[in-house]
Image (spheres, helix red, strand yellow):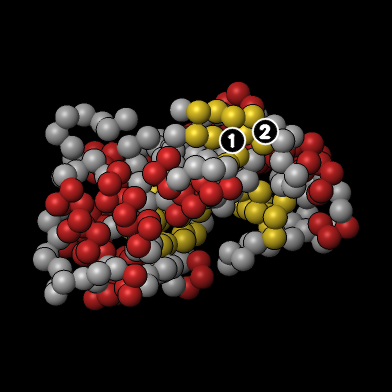
Amino acid sequence: MQIVEQEASSIIVPSRLPDTDYVINPYTGCSFACSYCYASFMGRFVGKSRDDWGNYVYVKTNAVELFRKEIAHSRFSTGPTLFLSSVTDAWQGPEGKYELARGILGELVRRSYPGRVSILTKSPLLLRDAELLSALPHAEVGVTVTTDDDAIGRIYEARAPRNSARLDLLRELSQRGVPTYAFLGPLMTHYVDAPDAMDALIGRVAQTGVRFVYAELLNVARPLMLRLQSVMSVDQTEAARFVVAHADPARRQRLSELVVRLLDKHGLELRLGRVIDHADPSTLRKSGSPAPLAPLKPPQQGDAR
Ligand code: SF4
C-alpha cells in the first residue's frame, strides 16, 4: 500500500448526488479496494490506473485546515447538506493515524453546524468518533452492507471490513442514539435466485435499528465490470458469467421488486423511493440470455487479502 501525503487546494466540493449539496473527501484512493468501486476513476487525478485502485491512498494533510476556512463562508450559514465521503471511505486505515475525518467532524461540532451531515462508511473505526456524531445536531450515519454472509463478501470486498462488523457498527451506533441508515448495495443479482437470503439480510438490517435504507444495484458500466471481473476472487469464467447476469434487465427488475417488497415487509423506509440502478446495458456485450446464476461460493483457500 502506497501512502502519499499531499496538500489539497480545496476540500468542500459541490455535489451532483441526490440528497447532497456538498461532498468532502479527505483522501484520494481507498485501501478497502472493493472490486466494484465506481470511484476507481479517481486514479486519473493522481496518475494511477483503475487497476491500481486499492493500492494507494493520497492523504490531504491540510484537509482540516482547509475545511475550517471553507466552512466559514457565508454559503454554509444556511446549512446545506454535507456528505463524507463520495469517492473514498473517510474512516479507512490511514484515518487511524491522520484523523482528518475526525478533525472535520470536530469543526462541525464546534460550529454546531445547522445542516444535515451525512456519513457513509464501511469502517468500525467510526466508533472512535461516536461522541462527535452525538454532538452534531443533524448527523446521520450510513453503513454500507452488501450481504450478511462474510464468506460471500470476501469474494468482492476482500479488503474491506466484514459485513458482520458493519452490521455490529450500525447496531452500536443506533444504541448510542446516533441516527443511522443502511446503504444496501451494490446488491448482487444472485439474490434473485435466493430470495430467502435477501429476506434474512434485510431482516438483520432492520434489527440494527436503522431509520431508513438506500438500495442500489450493481453498476454495470463496462470499465467497472472489467475491473470487477479481474479482481473478484473466483475463477474468470464464473466472474464473467456473474457480470453478464448482472446486466440482464429482467434480473435487475426482479431484484428491485424483491428489495422493495422485503423492505416493506420489514418496515424499512426506502429513501429516494426507488432502488438506484445505474444500468446501461448497451455498454455490455451480451450473447443471448444469461444462464441462471449459481449461488456465489466462497473462495476455497482463505481470504484474498
Ligand atoms: S469502501 Fe467505498 S470508496 Fe472504498 S473501495 Fe469500497 S466502495 Fe470504493
Q: Residue at x 59, y 35 (%)?
A: 58
First in residue order: circle 1 vs circle 2: 2
| Disc 2: which residue | 6
Q: In the image, what residue type sits under mark 1?
A: Tyr
Is residue 193 toward the left or the right of residue 2 in the image?
A: left
Identify the element where label 2 is drawn: strand
**Residue 250 % position (x, y):** 24, 76
Label 1 within 8 A of ligand 1 by Cβ: no
- Asked if the beta carbon under badge 2 is closer than 8 A to the nearest atom of ligand 1, the reply is no
x then y, percent, for residue 115? 74, 57
Q: Tell me which residue sits at (32%, 73%) in the image.
A: 281
Rendered image: mark on residue 147: none
Which quarter of the figure has residue 78?
bottom right
To which residue does mark 1 refer? 58
Work out whether residue 253 or residue 236 is closer to the camera in this orientation and state it. Answer: 236
Residue 180 or residue 57, whichever sits in front: 57
View extreme (top): residue: 97
Q: Nearer the viewer, residue 245 or 142?
A: 245
In this rendering, the answer to whether 116 lies above or below 292 is above
Dividing the picture into quarters, in which one does residue 279 lie? bottom left
Q: Residue at x 39, y 44 (%)?
A: 51
Residue type pointed to by label 2: Gln
Residue 23 place in picture, x, y as percent: 65, 54
- Looking at the image, residue 32 sits to the left or right of residue 5; the answer is left
Q: Is residue 100 visible?
A: no
Residue 78 vs 163, above or below: the answer is: below
Mark 1 vs 2: CB contact within 8 A: yes
Alpha carbons under labels 1 and 2: distance apart: 7 Å
Residue 284 found in image quarter: bottom left
At horizontal 15% and vertical 52% (from top left) the residue drawn is 238
